[in-house]
Image (cartoon, rainbow, N blue to C red):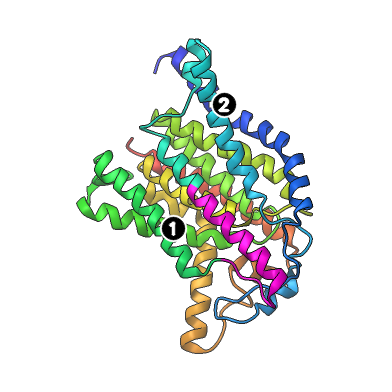
Amino acid sequence: MNAPDLTISVIKVLGSAGAAFFVALVLTPPLMRLMRARKLWKAKSGKKALAGGEATTFNALHNETSTPRVGGILIWASALLVLFLFWMFDRLIDNSILEKLNFFSRSQTWLLAFTLVTASLLGLADDMLQIWTSRHKALSGGIDLITRLAAVSLIALVGAFWFYFKLDWRTVYIPGVGNLFIGAWYIPFFVVTMIATFSGGVIDGIDGLAGGVLASAFAAYAGIAFFQNQIDVAAFAAAIVGALLAFLWFNIPPAKFWMGETGIIGLTTTLTVLAFFTDSVLMLPIIALPLVLASGSDSIQIISRRFFGRKVFRVAPIQHHFEALGWPSYQVTMRFWVISVACAIIGMAIALVGR
C-alpha cells in the first residue's frame, strides 16, 4: 500500500469511527425521549434464574426499574446509519475521495451488516417481551432460551454458508503455524463459535461493563483487519467502536439507559462474523476473554448446582460474584475494562504473527 492509499485508508477507518460517535450523540436525545415516553423499562424488578424461579441474589443487587433497557438501538442504528451515509454520498456525489471512503461492499461488509441487523432485531423483540411480561406477570421473561438459540443458529448458518459456498473458505489460520484445512467442518465450527460468543452476552448487567469490553474487542479486530488490508471490514468495526464509545458516555454509572438484548445479541454475533472475516477466530477467546469468563462461570454454576447440589459462585456470571463479595460495581467495571484492553492487545499481536 503506497502512502496516498494508506492515508485514505486511515481516514476511512478513523472517519467511520468518528462519524458513528457523533451520529450516536445526535441520536441520543430523541432516543431517550422515545424510551421514556414509551416507558421502555421493566415495570418491576425481578429476573428469572437459569434454573427457574427468582434470581434472588441478583435481584437484591440490582434494581431494573425506571432505566430504559433498549439503549443498544443507539449502537447498531448509528453504525448502520454511517454505513448508509457513506454509501449514499458516494452514489449521489461524483467524487473520487467519497468513493474511496464508502465501505459498503459485497465482499466484506454485506454479511456483517446483515448479521448486525437481524440479530439486533431478535434482541429487540426479546427486550420488548421482557418489558411486557414485567407489567403482566410476577417475573419478567423474554424469548425463551431454546428459541433464541435456534434463531442465533439460523443466523450463524447463513454466515457459515456464505463463507463456505460464496467465499470458498475451508481453512482456519493458526498464528505462527499457517492454515489448517477443515473442509466441511467449517460450517459447524462457525455455528458453534457464534453460539459460544452469543452465550458470552451474559457479561451485560453492570453499568458500562459490556460496552467497554465489546469496544476493546471490536477495536482489536478493526486493527487486525486494517493490517491485513481489509479496509472495509476495519471501517465497519471502527464504526461500531465509535458508536459504543458514544453509548458508554451515557451508560457509565449511573446509566441513562442499558444496552439490552438488542445490543448484546447484535454485537456478539457480529463479533463472531468479524473474527471469521479476519481469519483470526482462534484469537477470539483471548481478545474477548471477559465474555469467556462470564459464560464459563455461568456454565460452571449450572453444572455444579445440577450434579453436586451447591454453588461455586455466590452468584453467576462472575462479575456479579464480585459484586456479592462487596466490590463496588464501578470497580468491577474498571477492572474488567483493564483486562479487556490487555487481552485485545495481546490477541491482536498474536493474530498478526506470520501474516
Q: In front: 127, or 242? A: 127
* Vertical placement of residue 342 versus 311, above or below: above
- The image's mark for residue 85 is 2
- Left or right placement of residue 253 versus residue 165 in this view: right
* Vertical placement of residue 19 versus 3, above or below: below
Q: Position of residue 5 (x, y in %)?
A: 44, 16
Q: Are marks 2 and 1 in contact (CB under 8 Å)?
A: no
Q: Quadrant of the N terminus?
A: top left
Q: Which residues are magenta?
A: 118-142
Residue bearing mark 1 = 152
* Residue plotted at (58% across, 30% down): 82
Q: Position of residue 185 (x, y in %)?
A: 24, 56
Q: In front: 210, or 330? A: 210
Residue 276: in magenta span: no
Q: Mark 2 or mark 1: which comes first in sequence?
A: 2
Q: Is residue 231 visible?
A: yes
The residue positioned farthest toward the bottom in the image shown: 309
Q: Is residue 8 visible?
A: no
- The image's mark for residue 318 is none
